[in-house]
């Protein structure tokens, strides 16, 4: 820039019009005309000031140009930025808004115009937005997140509101204009993505929780399973060993993990071979080993699973020990049940045979007695008749043993001390005991009493001791009889059919040759014997079985070949507070030794009723020889009709109990209905407690066992007629 011409300051008011001088001349002239002194300093100062002003003007023009350019750029950025931008005044009115704001808040012409931002804010967020503006006013900026702006009736925008305070300068020294620059960042997509992520996270957490719960349930199932569960990897190493497996194989899980499965299942290779054929297999029974080497019977099934890490085989092993024991016990009970049914059937059959055989024996013995009386003692036939009578008496005793075995009714029992019964039996045994055999007795002190029939108990003990003596034979040996208190365990009670409680056990043991297993199963069968013909009836143990059954007890046998046999009788013990059973007075049962006949003062009329004609004929002959008038009937109905026709004719009625289609008790009832004071007796070879009770209830005065001797029969009739029974 050339220096300014300030010469006008030194000239007059009217300029001089001179022609331009040459430059050099002009410079010389200027130098000649340059003032000096204070004036020159003033001019220099003015010129410097002029230069400074020109520089400031240049800066001002540059600043103005930059401001205009920045304003243009701001306008361009404000209008083209992909955000809803608005400028609000201090009253909340929209001063300026870019196109994005208009498209967001006024998508159509029918929508509300963008004149005020607060009008678009949802009521729930209005207070929060006002607080944000107050914060921006105080601090210069603020934000409100996830603000919902209502656009129309159904549409809305969820976005973050960012607020910045701006101050626009004013002319004429006025305070700056307060405005707010607002940016609304639409968070709809982000919120949707965030919600999707949150939902995915929740679902993932739920799946993880379900997975953990499933793992816990699976672990609980495995740990609480009653079967042994073993998981094996592709190298046949144990990876899972549940508590049941630890108990079954007697090995801790920590010791079993990692060991080969062949340690417990020697045939594991056979198990794993099915992996190529199926995913599951039931292998059935196999042999397993405990950690100590003990063999176990187990039922095995397997499951195969293939995954990215290889294969996993799950082995399920179920212990069959309990099942085999239960099956063996069940088979034992079935054998016992079959044996019981067989014994019951045999007993019933034997009882029926014995009943019919009684009548035959009665006829044989009675006719033999009559024949002896007819032929006299010196007759050659007398000796034969005596032998016939002896054989008949042995047959009678045999029949009574059969009936003892076959009876199911409770015997006539009373409170008995088995020690006393055993002492009486010992005296009988020692009389016939061979010298080479030792009899030893051991009776425990303070044994409780039992409810028993002493005669039957003595018979059972005699039979057992006699069998033991016969088993020892001619060699040396010993028979030991023990009496003590016992309490059988559950298994023994189930096997023997005993109730829970205390028992007095009577044991007869010997050190003889023992009994073979095949024979042991049949020893209680009637007529089964291993003795030679003529040396045994096969009823000894059958009678023992019947006696114990009627006493509510049981007989147990144990035998080892070469070591001997042991028979144990279990009698239910009476409690200390139980008093002796008070029985009703029983009817007299006449089967003992005969009393001497008393000649009747007059002829008595006896009615005898039995379905066996031979027995009726025999009784008629017997009693007629004794001076009685006898009317015999084989049909009880005819006998009742005869009694009804002439009730005062008869002095005594003796009737059989079991007749075809008719019961002797019914005849007793009918006879006493006709004549209440008539003495009545009931005869039977099979008298049970039920028969005795029914006869007593109907008024019978005596029960007569068949078969009986002639003298017994006559004595009984005499006592009935004399009113002694």
Image: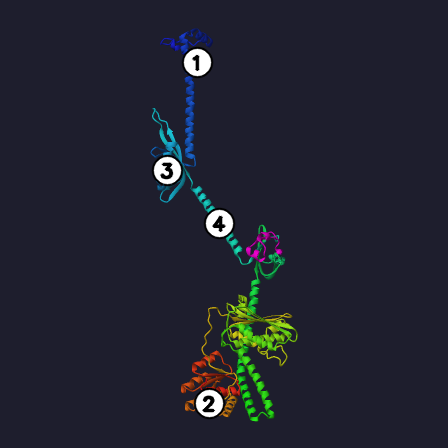
Residue hosting label 1: 3
Question: Toward which corner of the image does residue 299 lie, by quadrant?
Answer: bottom right
Residue 216 position in % (x across, y down): 51, 52
Q: Please, what secondary structure does the residue beneath circle 1 have?
A: loop
Q: CA distance from mark 2 to mark 3?
A: 133 Å
Q: Badge 1: few (under 14), some or many (20 or more) residues near its Cα, within 10 Å?
A: few
- Where is the N terminus found, in terms of image quarters? top left
Q: Which of marks 4 and 1 precedes in the sequence?
A: 1
Q: Badge 2: few (under 14), some or many (20 or more) residues near its Cα, within 10 Å?
A: many
Based on the picture, tell me whether residue 560 belongs to the magenta stretch: no
Q: Please, what secondary structure does the residue beneath circle 4 have?
A: helix
Q: Is residue 60 above or below residue 236?
A: above
Q: Is residue 192 above or below residue 561?
A: above
Q: Please, what secondary structure does the residue beneath circle 3 have?
A: helix
Residue 663 position in % (x across, y down): 46, 83
Q: Which of marks 3 and 1 precedes in the sequence?
A: 1
Depth check, front residue: 466 or 272:
466
Residue hosting label 2: 606
What span is in magenta? Answer: 237-263
Q: CA distance from mark 2 to mark 4?
A: 101 Å
Depth check, front residue: 554 or 24:
554
Q: CA distance from mark 1 to mark 2?
A: 192 Å
Query: Which label lies toward us, 1 or 3?
Result: 3
Residue hosting label 3: 129
Residue hosting label 4: 209
Does residue 535 appear to the left or right of 122 in the view shown? right
Q: CA distance from mark 3 to mark 4?
A: 40 Å
Q: Is residue 641 above or below residue 693?
A: below
């Amino acid at each position: 820039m050339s220096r300014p011409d300030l010469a006008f300051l030194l000239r007059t008011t009217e300029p001089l019009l001179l022609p331009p001088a040459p430059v050099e001349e002009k410079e010389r002239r200027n130098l000649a005309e340059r003032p000096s002194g204070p004036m020159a300093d003033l001019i220099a100062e003015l010129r410097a000031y002029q230069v400074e002003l020109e520089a400031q003007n240049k800066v001002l023009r540059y600043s103005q140009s930059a401001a205009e350019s920045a304003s243009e750029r701001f306008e361009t950025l404000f209008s083209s930025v992909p955000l809803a931008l608005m400028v609000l005044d201090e009253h909340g009115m929209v001063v300026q808004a870019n196109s994005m704001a208009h498209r967001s808040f006024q998508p159509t012409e029918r929508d509300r115009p963008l004149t005020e931002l607060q009008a678009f804010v949802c009521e729930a967020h209005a207070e929060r937005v006002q607080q944000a503006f107050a914060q921006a006013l105080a601090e210069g900026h603020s934000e409100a997140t996830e603000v919902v702006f209502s656009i129309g009736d159904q549409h809305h925008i969820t976005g973050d509101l960012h607020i910045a305070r701006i101050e626009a300068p004013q002319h004429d020294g006025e305070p700056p204009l307060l405005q707010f620059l607002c940016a609304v960042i639409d968070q709809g997509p982000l919120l949707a993505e965030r919600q999707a992520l949150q939902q995915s996270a929740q679902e993932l957490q739920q799946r993880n929780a379900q997975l953990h719960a499933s793992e816990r349930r699976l672990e609980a199932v495995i740990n609480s399973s009653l079967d042994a569960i073993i998981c094996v990897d592709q190298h046949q190493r144990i990876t899972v060993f549940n508590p049941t497996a630890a108990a079954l194989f007697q090995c801790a899980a920590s010791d079993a993990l990692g060991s080969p499965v062949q340690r417990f299942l020697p045939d594991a290779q056979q198990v794993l071979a099915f992996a190529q054929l199926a995913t599951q297999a039931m292998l059935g029974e196999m042999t397993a080993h405990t950690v100590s080497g003990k063999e176990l019977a187990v039922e095995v099934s397997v499951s195969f699973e293939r995954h990215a890490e290889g294969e996993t085989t799950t082995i399920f092993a179920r212990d069959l020990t309990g099942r085999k024991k239960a099956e063996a016990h069940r088979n034992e009970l079935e054998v016992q049940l079959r044996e019981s049914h067989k014994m019951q059937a045999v007993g019933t059959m034997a009882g029926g045979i014995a009943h019919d055989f009684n009548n035959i024996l009665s006829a044989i013995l009675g006719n033999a007695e009559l024949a002896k009386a007819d032929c006299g003692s010196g007759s050659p036939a007398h000796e034969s008749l005596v032998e016939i009578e002896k054989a008949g008496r042995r047959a009678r005793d045999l029949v009574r043993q059969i009936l003892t075995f076959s009876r199911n009714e409770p015997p006539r029992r009373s409170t008995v001390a088995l020690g006393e019964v055993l002492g009486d039996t010992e005296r009988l045994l020692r009389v016939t005991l061979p010298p080479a055999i030792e009899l030893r007795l051991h009776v425990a002190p303070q044994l409780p009493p039992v409810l028993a029939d002493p005669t039957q108990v003595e018979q059972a003990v005699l039979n057992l001791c006699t069998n033991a003596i016969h088993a020892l034979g001619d060699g040396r040996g010993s028979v030991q009889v023990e009496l003590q208190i016992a309490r059988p365990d559950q298994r023994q009670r189930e096997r023997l059919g005993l109730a829970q409680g205390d028992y007095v056990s009577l044991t007869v043991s010997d050190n003889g040759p023992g009994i073979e297993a095949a024979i042991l199963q049949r020893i209680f069968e009637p007529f089964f014997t291993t003795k030679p013909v003529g040396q045994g009836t096969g009823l000894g143990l059958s009678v023992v079985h019947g006696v114990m059954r009627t006493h509510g007890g049981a007989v147990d046998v144990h035998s080892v070949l070469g070591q001997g046999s042991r028979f144990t009788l279990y009698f239910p013990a009476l409690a200390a507070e139980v008093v002796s059973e008070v029985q009703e007075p029983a009817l007299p049962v006449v089967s003992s030794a005969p009393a001497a006949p008393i000649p009747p003062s007059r002829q008595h009329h006896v009615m005898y009723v039995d379905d066996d004609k031979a027995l009726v004929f025999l009784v008629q002959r017997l009693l007629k020889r004794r001076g009685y008038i006898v009317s015999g009937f084989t049909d009880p109905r005819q006998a009742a009709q005869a009694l009804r026709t002439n009730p005062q004719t008869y002095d005594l009625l003796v009737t059989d109990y079991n007749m075809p289609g008719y019961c002797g008790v019914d005849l007793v009832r009918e006879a006493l209905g006709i004549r209440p004071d008539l003495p009545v007796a009931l005869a039977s070879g099979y008298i049970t407690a039920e028969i005795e009770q029914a006869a007593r209830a109907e008024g019978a005065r005596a029960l007569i066992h068949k078969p009986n001797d002639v003298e017994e029969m006559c004595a009984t009739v005499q006592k009935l007629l004399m009113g002694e029974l």
